[in-house]
Amino acid sequence: MRYETIKSVILTILVLVSILLTWNLWTYQPDYETMKSRNYVNEVTLSKKQEVKKIIRPDLAMFHINGKHYGTYNDGELEKVIKELSKWTFFDLKNYTDKVNNFNQLVHGSGNAEIIFPDEVPIELYRSVLNIKQRKVPSFNFDRIVINVEHSEKENGIVYFVSSKNRDVYISNISLANLNAFYRSFFKNGDEYPVYFAYNPTNTRTIFLPKNETKMIMYKYVPKTLDSEEFKEALFSDPSFVKKSILTNGEEYTNDSSKLTIINDKNMLSYVNPTAEDNYTENAYDLVKRSIDFVNEHGGWTDQFRYAAKDEYKRMVTFRLYSKDGLPVFNDVGLSEITEVWGRNELNKYIRPNISLELQLTTEAKSVISSSGYEALEMVKDRPNYKPELLEQIVLGYHMEKDPEGSKLILLKPAWYYRYDNQWEMITTKDGGDRDMDWSKIKTIFIITFLVLDVYLLYQFLKIRDANKYEIMSDASFEEKLKAAEITFGELPKTLIKAKYLGATPKVFTAEDTKKLTGQRIASKEPSTVLIANLEKPLQLSSKFEPAELTAFLKGHVLYGDQYQFWEKNDKQQTITYFQQYDNLPLYHNINGMISFKFNVKNQVVAYQQSYLEGIEGMAAKKEEILSPLKVIETLHQKGLLKPKSKITKVELGYSTLIQLAASQVLAPTWRFEVNGKESLFVNAFEGQIIDFNSDEKMSVE
């Protein structure tokens, strides 16, 4: 047998083994105990429901004027256009396909305005946005609305609904008053929008691209993890029979037929119901409508998602995240998409992110200049074996990625994308290297790759099979376990508490600030974010120190002294620490918001060091519900952080640093549990992470 033949056989075996192991990992279900539902939720709401006009929106408006093309993707401008169209009355809607002599001229010709959608839209669904005055409306799909501004009839204006994919055209009439209003509001000044050029990869396809470079913004967001329990309540018909397991990198919920998986490192959620009947083809209207209705049922529009694509044969609908300025967002693992696959009567698959981007760091936003459409087009043409007939679209958008510096931030970076042979890819600079690597070398690389993959998959399968550690607990068992362990606590807040993430900036102390201080010698250099002062006359403390002894000095001799509260006295280090507070809540262990007094062997305060956070304000429009103290106590017990016979002597809410940036920081609401009057346990009140102030790592609490 030839050497290459042997390699082919080995590669085939390795591929089959990897498929088998992957299938076993996917379908493996150990025996669980049934998890009892604490409160059955009939309707779960993660976010607000959205109307069709908010989900099905155009990507681009083009104005073809005197042989030139002008366009805008600006979200505000497109909102105005659709709002104007929604005021019109459309009548005499009928099929016009057979009467079209020049398709490109009808759609892209001078004198037309072209409203472009990301994919075909069923007219039956869009009737909720447009006022179509007609008893029986024909059934069709469109991806462009073409308004014939300069060449309409004398009595009525003409609007075309066009499918560029199937080259179908439907014609409708509007009043001349509507048409003239559109001309005055939009078309007349259309040449003030950016200039576009047309590229025709084939005789039947036209792509419009901006002629010049575009000024864009690179965004940074603090992601908020969504509650997996709420998705469990929404996705399973009877949550009381759902079983839960803790995986090495997430969670898994199962019943007899379905599985919900949360993948923490990818921030993704995947629901699969393999029993849903899939041997049929869905019509476009029903498919898109029930996909929107499904997400509305549990308020799943946690960010600005829009309708992006449908496939009737695969019964699949995709909704894509869009930026604040109206551009599509892409991600390598689907973090910017919501995908639904339907069976005949029920959902088959539901894949989406389990985070939301509610908190933008406006201070971290940066302006960047994207390349022109010409440059982007040339890079696409430069790809190996480029075939123009496979090029479907080129768009300016954003690439979504995690902060490479290791923080929790999510970045949206401007990028060009193109859809080629039904796949979206990011446009990159010209690739170097040998593109004609021979198949033998490629085969060797594949063998090594699949061998490593198979070893890893086998390890994961054995690990999951042997772990068998499931944390399934009802309310009653939790109380019983606390009682058995003799863990006690006092009165806890009974009402729901709401809070916000905070943004803050370290203050820079200047000579102007320090000249207000008397009886002190400033030892720190100015300007500085840390103020160090030596007292000219030491301040005597009593042998049994009480915080009240420093109150007068703080208010009269320390900048912003009334905004700090006592934390601890450390006799070993001879320090007394005060934490800055916001809204009467302490900022725990924040190096940019504390005062440390230094005392000597005579028990005299001789110096202090101060830092201060300014510009503290909420980062969201409204407050959101935080984890209850009881829920956190349950988790602390599960994690073994509450020892037997422990007594929780104090529970209080404050803030801790979630993300430290170069010039600012993000603060998260934080629960502090004082145990036995000594030890303090800190937990992120939104996401449930145990916070260790002596380590950069944080343990996730589920």
Image: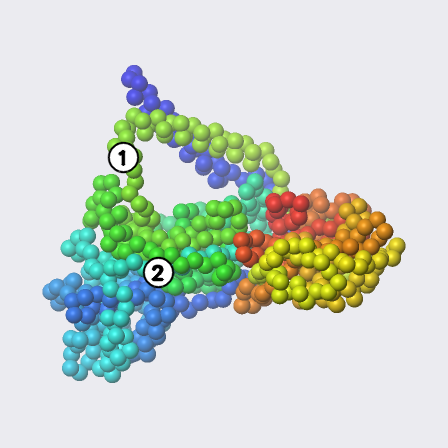
User: Is residue 595 something one can see in this rendering?
Assistant: no
Q: What amino acid type should be assigned to the residue bearing mark 2?
A: Lys
Q: Which residue position holds label 2?
A: 215
Q: Does 640 sit above or below residue 219?
A: above
Q: Which residue position holds label 1?
A: 435
Residue 510 is situated, as x and y percent measured from the top left of the image, at 61, 62
Residue under the point 47% across and 49% down: 402
Badge 2 density bin: few <14, some 14–19, many ≥20, Cα 10 Å = few
Residue under the point 62% across and 39% down: 469
User: Is residue 207 something one can see in this rendering?
Assistant: yes
Tell me which corner region of the image, top left, top right, bottom left or bottom right, holds residue 18: top left
Residue 181 is situated, as x and y percent measured from the top left of the image, at 27, 80
In this rendered view, identify the residue nearer to me: 653 or 246: 653
Residue under the point 58% across and 51% down: 241
Residue 522 is situated, as x and y percent measured from the top left of the image, at 69, 58
Residue under the point 35% across and 66% down: 74
The mark that comes first in sequence, 2 or 1, is 2
Q: CA gap, disc 2 to disc 1? A: 34 Å
Q: Is residue 57 left or right of residue 23?
A: left
Q: What amino acid type should be assigned to the residue bearing mark 1?
A: Arg
Q: Is residue 685 left or right of residue 66?
A: right
User: Tag 2, which secondary structure?
Assistant: strand
| Residue at far left of view | 101
User: Tag 1, which secondary structure?
Assistant: loop
In this rendered view, identify the residue nearer to me: 495 or 464: 495
Residue 221's disc number: none
Instruction: Give yes or no for contact between labels 2 and 1 (Cβ–Cβ under 8 Å).
Output: no
